[in-house]
Amino acid sequence: MVALRKILSSIYLWFALCERVVVCFSSPRANPIPITVLSGFLGSGKTTLLQHLLNNREGLRIAVIVNDVASVNIDSKLIASSRNPAEGASGMVELQNGCACCSLSEELLSSVSELVMLSDMKADDEGFHHIVIEMSGVADPKSVRSKFQEAILYNMPLMERVRLDTMATVIDCSLFMDYVASAKTVSSDETPELFYGEEGKPSPTDDNWTDELPAPLLEALLAKKESQVSDGGDSGVAELMVGQTETADVVLLNKVDLAEDTSSKDEEKVTDQIRNIVKALNPRATIHETTYGQIQLQNILGVAGGNGVVEAGIVDDHRDSVTAASIQNLNDDHNHSYNHDNHEHSPTHDTSHSHSHSHASSECTDPACTDSSHSHAHSQLNAECTDPDCTDSSHSHSHQSNHAGIGTYVYQARRPFHPERLLAFFRHLPIVRGLPEKAEEGLDLTGKITELEALKPILNKVLRSKGFAWCADSNIAALYWGQAGGSFEMQCLGRWWATLPREQWPKEAESMVLADFDDRSHVEDSGSTSVGDRRQEVVFIGQGLGNPSSQDKLEEELNKCLLDDDEWDFFLAQRGSEEKLRERFVNPIKIRMATY
């Protein structure tokens, strides 16, 4: 009889939830609820920030989705009595100030949907003003961005009620420099502190506030807590830190009071070094320095208005990096308007196709040069010469940003790399994972690559390199090179636009596509002397790259990785045969097909 009552109760609850779904998604609420995604390593201060948001006295009703409600340590005096048993069973905690906190379910959008239903069941003046999603410390925020972009692409009804608005990342200033230099992988075995805290084991939490919770709610919270820990795959610590920093509209430099400053009076402070690295990695982000996660709510909630990184993808992120280098957007008084006037982003811009394009200039510094047979490598961080009075166009105007040693350099060329020589170059970067096992035999170096002794101090300090790559084993594949710290990955984004008939191009993106062509009238045939949008366009970020002499040496070595004249003649003669190109230019580099 008891079992029957449980079954009937479950059926009743299921029908009740279905009715709530129909009522809520058909409700006439005018504005969608903005969502802020909060990323950051374990211990960075996300939980303290969440407590600050939930306990706000500014009248904002904020709903928070967290990995573990029990760890938030909510003041029991603020907890409102549960009005619905279904809410307690799902791990929902409502506060007297109108805020709410719930544990993340196996499917993120299900948790969001549950909060929307709860909000729509309230009176018009009691619904949630904002939803905040806390990512786990080892999660890549790009994955959440992709979920929402896919939801828009597939016209999910939920997206009429919510809008992914802002991506925010919290950085622990006391550990940031160690993380970006780490060669460790993200795993509970090698880096347990990223999963359990500094002690390398599950962190003790003050669970006293849970003593007064109803038994069903407490049981739900504890059940969810047991399934929170999961490894971060094969990614590296530096790679994850860089990814979280790059995928953010707002970056909080937290624990500035704990950042150890061992520099001398004449050297840059640690927090200034971190700020400059963050600016180099993510020029568009707004940066705030905080202690104990204290920040005004308007500086983190609803900041981007849905027009920042939330609508971008891998191609847009790259384009913004190159554009930022071109317009010298790495300055101390960064002020980003999120208008992106020179971009044509759409909510699903990068998820709807797999072709590469960017706004980077494809011309040589010599404005009269149209020769695509030689390297057009430029540092595009400044538009003017370092001599403010210089107007001479006869010499190189190669410039860079040099914030206390952190420089940004853009390498560009219109010939393909020889894959084996490119791999030999990769061996000189601080890469410890992502490259094939080292085997000197069989590599076709032909005396092109030197030992790079002079560049070793610079290459060893390359924090980030990323961008489009064209390898000689294919005239079709648009590759994307990505290195962060000790991790490397080469992805295939799809085909170069030049390989597709123009009638298949999206009309709204045609101007952006053509901006990457070496000749806007390019015709894809065997006799063409232009190459379309095929190119090398790689951004390098690291200490010492602000030195023009280092840039010249880096350019020289990368040029040696390009096909020489004889190889280029063979490539042009056989570019219609992918099989012959693969046979002649064997590619030992692992390439993964990009997912969107």
Image (tube, grey):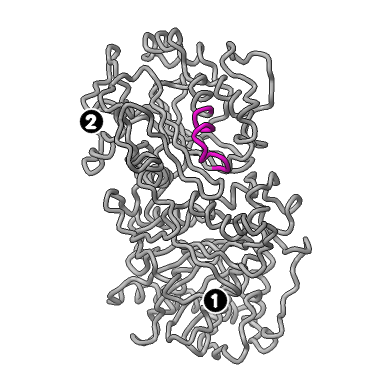
Residue sitting at 59 percent across and 82 percent down? 5
In the displayed structure, 369 sits above or below 189; it is above
Marks 2/1 in contact by CB < 8 Å: the verdict is no
Q: Element at badge 1?
A: loop
Residue 107: x percent and y percent? 52, 61
In the displayed structure, 102 sits above or below 383; it is below
Residue sitting at 49 percent across and 49 percent down? 280
Kindly identify which residue carries mark 1.
294
Residue 279: x percent and y percent? 48, 53
- The answer for how far apart the CA atoms under marks 2 and 1 are is 52 Å
In the displayed structure, 483 sits above or below 585; it is below
**Left or right of residue 161, residue 5 in this image:** right
Q: Quadrant of residue 475?
A: top left
Kindly identify which residue carries mark 2.
502
**Left or right of residue 265, residue 409 in this image:** left
- Name the amino acid, label 1: Gln
- What range is drawn magenta here? 542-553
In the displayed structure, 262 sits above or below 586; it is below
- Number of marks present in the image shown: 2
Residue 99: x percent and y percent? 49, 82
Q: Nearer the viewer, residue 168 or 437?
A: 168
- Name the amino acid, label 2: Arg
Residue sitting at 25 percent across and 27 percent down? 501
Give the quadrant of the N terminus: bottom right
Give the quadrant of the C terminus: top left
